[in-house]
Image: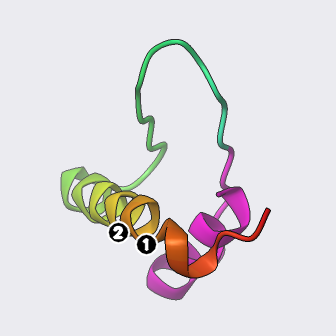
């Protein structure tokens, strides 16, 4: 998940740092940027999650 999300965010925003942490609660933290950037990250995350069948290989 981290690698795929990193690829997609780098295409949109250039150099980024992605960290995916598994926890009991869902949450998203975007450091830097504005509310439009956070919205774009949320959309990219959703698209990445929904397309997992295309890129995820156990």
Q: Residue furthest top?
A: 24
Quadrant of image for the N terminus = bottom right
CB contact under 8 Å: marks 2 and 1: yes
Camera sees residue 14: no
Q: Is residue 2 magenta?
A: yes
Up-down relation of residue 45 to residue 12 (above or below): above
Q: Residues within 10 Å of mark 2 (few under 14, many from 20)?
A: few
Using residue 56 as the reference point, say whether residue 44 is left or right of it.
left
Q: Residues within 10 Å of mark 1 (few under 14, many from 20)?
A: few
Q: Main secondary structure of the magenta part?
A: helix
Using the numbered discs, state the Cα–Cα distance from disc 2 to disc 1 in whole angstroms.
6 Å
User: Regarding mark 1 in the picture, which secondary structure is present there?
Assistant: loop
**Mark identifier at residue 13:** none
User: Regarding mark 2 in the picture, which secondary structure is present there?
Assistant: helix
Using residue 52 as the reference point, say whether residue 15 is left or right of it.
right
**Mark identifier at residue 47:** 2
| Nearest to the observer: residue 50 or residue 4 | 50
x and y percent of residue 52 in the render? 52, 67
x and y percent of residue 54 in the render? 54, 81
x and y percent of residue 14 in the render? 58, 81
Q: Residue furthest right?
A: 58
Quadrant of image for the C terminus = bottom right
Up-down relation of residue 9 to residue 30 (above or below): below
Instruction: Find the magenta span and give its range.
Output: 1-19
List the residue tagged with mark 1. 51
């Amino acid at each position: 998940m981290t690698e795929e999300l990193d690829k997609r965010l780098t295409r949109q925003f250039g150099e980024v740092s992605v960290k995916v942490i598994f926890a009991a609660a869902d949450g998203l933290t975007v450091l830097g940027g504005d509310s439009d950037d956070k919205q774009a990250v949320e959309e990219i995350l959703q698209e990445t999650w929904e397309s997992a069948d295309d890129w995820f290989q156990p």
